[in-house]
Image (cartoon, rainbow, N blue to C red):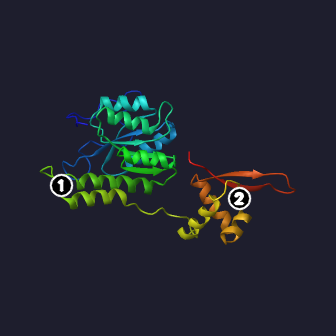
Amino acid sequence: MTRASSGPPPSDDGSGDGPGSRDRFGDGAPGADVVRVLVVDDEPLTAEAHAAYVARVDGFALAGVAHDGRAALARLRDDPSIDLVLLDMNLPDTHGIALCRALRTAGSTVDVIAVTAVRDVQVVRAAVSLGIVQYLIKPFTYAAFADRLGAYRTFRASLTVGDGLVTQGDVDAGLATLRTATPPTLGKGLSPATLDRVVAVVRGRPDPWTAEALAGSAGVSRVTARRYLEHLESAGLVRREQLYGSPGRPESTYRWLSAR
């Protein structure tokens, strides 16, 4: 999209400049361009949280919030100075992929980062084909969010050259910045190798797992199995259910969630 010469438009329907918005040229070195961000998410509390995250990251300013595809398209049409869209895939009136296709069909080159709980591999592939520059899966920490935005800003800077031409090195460095992410931080006592083994076992069958059954199949203790299952639940990868029918307290079971 062509950058407007004026500042951000007034807010409308609660989607204008939010808390923590910065002057477009008020952050970083004199004259540095601030990345203006539109948050698109149908959950008001989630959208508010992401907007607050944007306000905390240096070099970024909130341009607005939209809760459905129609509002997002209208905002992008009315404000061509928006640089980046943080896009949820599940919207009440459309899918994020369909929204991106509509943007590209309309000639928009605005950058998009998917911020979503959708883990379907077909959606991820479609996102890549549409030029979505990052895919951040919920839930995530502020550190992971800031890491993705920082990588995106470095990517933009790496391809900003005075004569408008780039070298192969410029292209390689820019793309490498987008594809390099900080490994997710696991809880104390959890290891990536054991987590990979647990995931392979749990996702290998559709039936629910108890901590005791997982311990025997994964070669870990029952306590360790429960910790990893609880970690997977907090990451939205398994669903916990209560198993009744035997004397005493009900037992927790964990079922791997298929692609959503």
Callout 2 secondary element: loop
Task: Answer with left or right where residue 21 lies relative to residue 118.
Answer: left
Residue found at the very far right of the displayed protein: 247
Label drawn at residue 73? none
Counting from the top left corner in percent of width and height, residue 127 is at 41, 45
| Quadrant position of the N terminus in the picture | top left
Counting from the top left corner in percent of width and height, residue 236 is at 58, 51
Q: Is 62 in front, or is 228?
A: 228
Q: Is 250 in front, or is 9?
A: 250
Q: Amino acid at mark 2?
A: Trp
- From what the image shows, is residue 160 above or below residue 37? below
According to the image, label 2 marks what residue? Answer: 209
Task: Answer with left or right where residue 47 lies relative to residue 36.
Answer: right
Picture quarter containing residue 190?
bottom right
Residue lying at 24% horizontally and 53% vertically, measured from the top left: 157
Q: Amino acid at mark 1?
A: Val
Counting from the top left corner in percent of width and height, residue 211 is at 71, 63
Residue lying at 50% horizontally and 36% vertically, measured from the top left: 44
Callout 1 secondary element: loop
According to the image, label 1 marks what residue? Answer: 166
Residue found at the very far left of the displayed protein: 163
Tally the marks: 2
Q: Residues within 10 Å of mark 1 (few under 14, many from 20)?
A: few
Residue lying at 23% horizontally and 46% vertically, measured from the top left: 33
Residue 233 visible within the image: yes
- From what the image shows, is residue 163 above or below residue 83? below
